[in-house]
Each structure stands twice: as C-alpha cells, then as structure tokens.
Amino acid sequence: MRDKSQFRGSEIFAVGGEVVLQYAVEVFRQVAAMSLYESEAYEYLLDHYENPRNYGTLEDADISYEEGNPSCGDVIRIDVRTQDDRIADIRFSGKGCVISQASASILTELVKGKTLQEVRSMTKEDVLQALGIPISAMRLKCALLGLKVLKAGLYGIHRWPDEE
C-alpha cells in the first residue's frame, strides 16, 4: 500500500479511505491558505514598489546617507528630519529590485514618529516580518539595504561592522 503522500487527487476518491480523504482536505486547505497569504503579501510588496511611500528627498534633512549593494546594483538613499529625538519626517530614493525598493518604502512607514533609540534597536527580523514573505539568502541584502542605510546614517558610520 502506498503512503498517503503518494496519492493524486483523483485517486483519493477511488481509494475511498476516510483518513486519506481527511488528509487530502487538510493539505488542500493549507495550500489554499498559504497561496492566499503569499498572494496578498506579494501584492503588498508590489504596491509599495509601484506606489512607494515617502519617496523623494528632504532638502533640510538632519541625516542623509546613501549606499548601494555592489553585487546586484541596488541603491538606497535615506533622508531623515528629526525633532525631539524622533523621526519627524523621512524620505527614501534609489533604484533597484522590487524587494529593495518595497522594503525601503515599508521601512519608512515603520519608523516615522519613532524615537531614534527605537529605530536603532530595530532588527533585521523586524524588517523581514514587515515584508510578510519569506526572503531567500540571495535576496536578504536587498531586503535589508534600507535598514542598513538608515542605521548607518543614524549612527554616523560608513562601514558595517560585519562586512569585509
């Protein structure tokens, strides 16, 4: 007898086993839910890419920093205006892939109004969670470029400690 993971949809009904049918229904529900979730998450990213929030530059920025990812060509510039130790306004500009640009757009929404200490405390997990989709190791630098640029500007550093 074959393992239940080897059955095709049309065979499930031919076999008629209640356990197999329940298993198939559960798998279908999981796949449908994951597809819907991933579809909505990808739409969210595309929306931020096609309609970026806080895009542009600030003429009277207190902090401006720009950096690129030489391995793929993504470039992000972030301008920040502070007031009372908070991010009063923030803009980003740049060019690159959907993930880098959408991530920068999402990041600006996350940090506007936060204290500088709150932003300095943000982790890569915070950004990745806000993106809402799994990011492969190959695209991790794209997704985190905005956070790297923002933190480098806030800390006044021009070389990230764990980079070559």
Image (cartoon, rainbow, N blue to C red):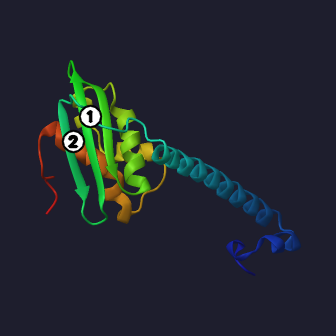
Amino acid type at circle 2 is: Lys
Q: In this view, does 11 lie above or below 151?
A: below
Please provide percent x and percent y for residue 35. Answer: 63, 55
Please provide percent x and percent y for residue 145. Answer: 29, 51
The numbered disc on residue 151 is 2
Please provide percent x and percent y for residue 134. Answer: 46, 56
- Disc 1 and disc 2 in contact, CB within 8 angstroms: yes
Amino acid type at circle 1 is: Val
Secondary element at tag 1 = helix
Nearer to the camera, 91 or 147: 91
Query: In the displayed image of the protein, which residue is found farthest to the front?
Result: 59
Count the marks: how many? 2
Residue, disc 1? 119
Nearer to the camera, 2 or 60: 60
**Residue shown at 83%/68% (left/top)?**
17
**Residue shown at 29%/39% (left/top)?**
122
